[in-house]
Amino acid sequence: MIPQLSKENSLDPLYLSYFKTLAAEGAFAGEIEYSYAARLSAATDNSVYQLLPAGILFPKTPGDIQAALRLAARKEFRGIRFAPRGGGTGTNGGSLTSGVIIDVSRHLKGLGAVDPEKRTVHAEAGVIKDWLNEQIKQYGLFFSPNLSTSNRATLGGMISNDASGQGSLKYGKTSQHILDTDVVLMDGSLVTFGPVSGDELKAKMDLATMEGQIYRTVYEIAAGKRDEIVKAFPDLTRFLTGYDLKHVWDPETGVLDISRIICGAEGTLGFITGATLDLTPVPSFRALVNIKYDSFDSALRHAPELVNAGVLSVETIDSCVFAMAKKDIVWYQVKDLLTEVPGKTMDGINIVEFAGTDAALEKVRMDLLINTLNEELREGNSRGIIGYQTCTELKDIQAVYAMRKKAVGLLGNADGAQKPVAFVEDTVVPPEHLADFIKEFRELLDSHHLRYGMFGHVDSGVLHVRPALDLCDPEQEVMLRTISDKVAELTAKYGGIMWGEHGRGYRSEYGPKYYGGLFDELRRVKGVFDPDNRINPGKICAPYGNDSASLVSVDAVKRGFYDRQIPSGVRQSYNRVVSCNGNGACFSYDTTSPMCPTYKFMGDRIQSPKGRAGLMREWLRELEEAGANPLLEEKLTEARGVTLGDLARKTWHTVTKRGYDFSDEVLEAMNVCLACKACASQCPIKVDVPDFRARFFNLYYSRYLRPAGDLLVKHFEESAPLMARLPALFNKVNSLSPAKFMVKKILGFVDVPVLSSPVLKDLLRGQTMERFDLNALEKLSPAERAKRVLIVQDTFTTVYDAPVVHDLVSLVAKTGKIPVLLPLKPNGKALHIRGYLREFAVTAAKTSDFYNRVFRLGIPMVGVDPAIVLCYRDEYRKTLGAARGDFVIRLTQEWLLDNLSLLTPRVKDENPYYLLAHCTQKSLKPGTHDDWVKIFRQVSLKLIPVPVGCCGMAGLYGHTAANEARSQAIYRQNWAPVFQKYPVNRCLVTGFSCREQVKRMEHAAVRHPLQVLNEIL
């Protein structure tokens, strides 16, 4: 039994008083969060560092930020420190703080009207880049900086880091598309910074306010030190981030633009609330030439010549990234676009894009490159080119870039304790020196016997290099420092900089050496904006005159410091928990993606795979600190089962519970999860929340009593088939008010599904099929067995949606095969979801034993519900290992694909059908949409897959009182728009729980795709 984790991480009384005063005075309308769970969720980003904040403010308006800062100006709160935060995906700890985080991502998402003629729009700081482009594409415009985290990166974060990404060769950086920025200064004033000159500039400089002082100081530095600035700042497309003194002042036009200082300031000068953006016309022509090389060095050395071909961009990936992509769900979409070259080893790829509004010109440029490549290949491969492929379809281009964008996360999924990590990943040198620079860089890493992955923007001289380190090992943490210092020297040698696009963050300590005499001028800039060093202190520089303030260092406390406190064996067992690197793929705004429906609906970082993994890491650490080993506790729980003594102890701990238990905060986060398993495949690290959630429940309820409803779940697969024998009676009883009251108040369920009536047995009367008889089947000849198909039942579909099972039997018969209905066996998925791991293992072992015996017949077994069928492949294999055996149960679509020639339609239907696939099915079987489209095409039917996220039901989740409102809200967000657009009777749904949710929310039944096939054959 696990102990109570009562050691609360207490909050500094100063900050607690500040939060309570801010809430009490009523001027702040947003949320104020300072629970330990909330603070942990913001203690990490995509860097190696970890720093626990005092709390998080989620402002709803710029006025909220002003109220927070004005309160902090009072004498008693002058010790409060702040840091702004957007998407939280920075790779160098730029937004980490021990003070108060002001997070704009939850509410500041307003978008003004687009001016198509001026090509401008005003957006608030929490607007996500891809969402923005989705809204403005109707005008033929887009916001062009194209970073890899574009589906969760906020505008405020992009401005703070002066983000760029793919295409910056032509499109430039974020700062080159910002017309003005709205900023709340430390004194609480809201100002707009943009280009001013002449009388307007004079008027600004004459202001007797903080704003006026800023204009006077920046002008004095930028104009007075112009020659030194031009000499010090490199002439690169990825110019320096962190107080851009070079571009803030234009001596030729006399324009001073303070927004250029805000861009790249990493949130150290003020709080960005919005900006006016300069938009770019969407190119009318786009195409890729994916060039393959025999070595990564060949790819790098070819890049400068490619740039001269008039391309939009050249992106490079090495064989390490390529190999990781092949293991990920993303590979399904690109496997035919980046094929291997027979007889050759492909160790590098250049993804070359041509794009523009003059389609004819871009086509000529692309053809010239292709002709050159063909000539190179004919002449004997002197440049290491071994082949190429082109992509001209938009969906293919997007698929290739989705793989490239996912590279940053994919590397974190490497095998072993050493994981490629970010700390020297955005160096930039002149492109003509990149190959030589990388050669020395690789020699440095090779000398330390390190693995690494490389990818990036070779057209701009930027390459993302991620050495693999085990930061749980203190010696390898020392190596991180050694390599950082050497890389800083190496970039200087080649005329480059160490922070090309991801900001300085914890690398700020290298600033003084790089800037030399100009560093004090940066400190003067910091001093005029933030004289008391209260905004993201330690980053970039300290205010001039504040010599006691220190800069953050690469030696700062890292996640590995906390993770190494977890025993090695526990870390290995909970590998997917501690491997989360904070890349934030689970923060995607896209409601058509299966990834984490609870985060999309709630906007709460705790309720995301990253948030839940962070809580679990801390939970495992605290267990060790309390002297408890979860692996030992799991073994004891499995061996002991449930005894009267255990029940008595659980009752005592539950009834007499006093004080704080960190396990309760973890429990709250786990209870909200739908266990949809999208994270297990959509996350590049494969953080499998349902897996460690089940393990947490198993241990949590070794100490405390379970909810009464869990008893219903535990015995569901035993009781439901019994109730199904008298469906009319039990449906009537369940509809009575006393029964509903008991189910809701005692068991915690708002309702239970309606039992099918007539039952499956009655539906199958007269249907061509055979009764299951194992002995008789074993005596059949191979030819006779080939005529048969074994139908695998599951409790949900058989008991509550029997017509679907009937129609599968009928469909199989119509193909000329003989269906054989296997006896209903418990699957146990519900047991696993609720953490009954001992009971699940017993169920899985018994069921596997039966299916292995049947599998030896060599007759295909076909199941109907994807979640259940995929449970046999996933949870069964993880739980039983080799003892699971080799049995294979096919999804309906898989069997149909193998038997397409048997599908002959007898009627025609010209109208399209619309497919809504189960989220677990799409995640674990990425070809689901294509499979069903191919099947329907075989019978001359048009099927249009509809990209949707989770329906919100997820088994019994939506039936529970605690989750009812959340379940329905997720449905309204993701699925309801589909039924507003398409007729219900033309929508086909593969998952039982999804059909049940539609029935509840639309008051209409939807069919499984197989039911349409059965109807027309």
Image (spheres, helix red, strand yellow):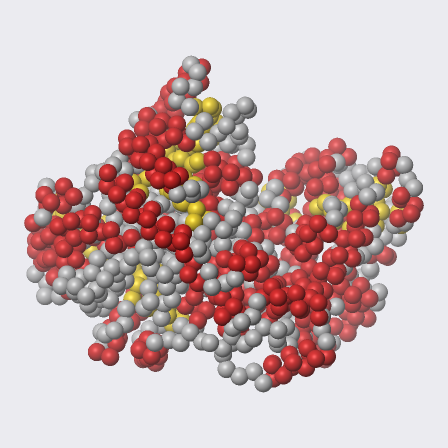
Residue 21 percent across, percent down from the top left: 32, 79
The answer, for residue 613, to whether it is visible in the render is yes
Q: Determine the residue positioned at 47% across, 64% down.
A: 565
Q: Determine the residue positioned at 69% across, 34% down.
A: 938
The quarter of the rendered structure image containing the N terminus is bottom right
Seen in the picture, residue 325 relative to 690 is either above or below; the reply is: above
Q: Residue furthest top?
A: 379
Q: Is residue 155 left or right of residue 800?
A: left
The quarter of the rendered structure image containing the C terminus is top right
860 or 413: which is nearer to us? 413
Q: Is residue 731 left or right of residue 387?
A: right
169 or 461: which is nearer to us? 461
Q: Is residue 333 left or right of residue 262?
A: right
Q: Determine the residue positioned at 62% across, 76% down.
A: 704
Residue 824 percent across, percent down from the top left: 81, 56
847 or 118: which is nearer to us? 847
Displayed quadrant of residue 48: bottom left
Residue 427 percent across, percent down from the top left: 31, 43
The answer, for residue 997, to whether it is visible in the render is no
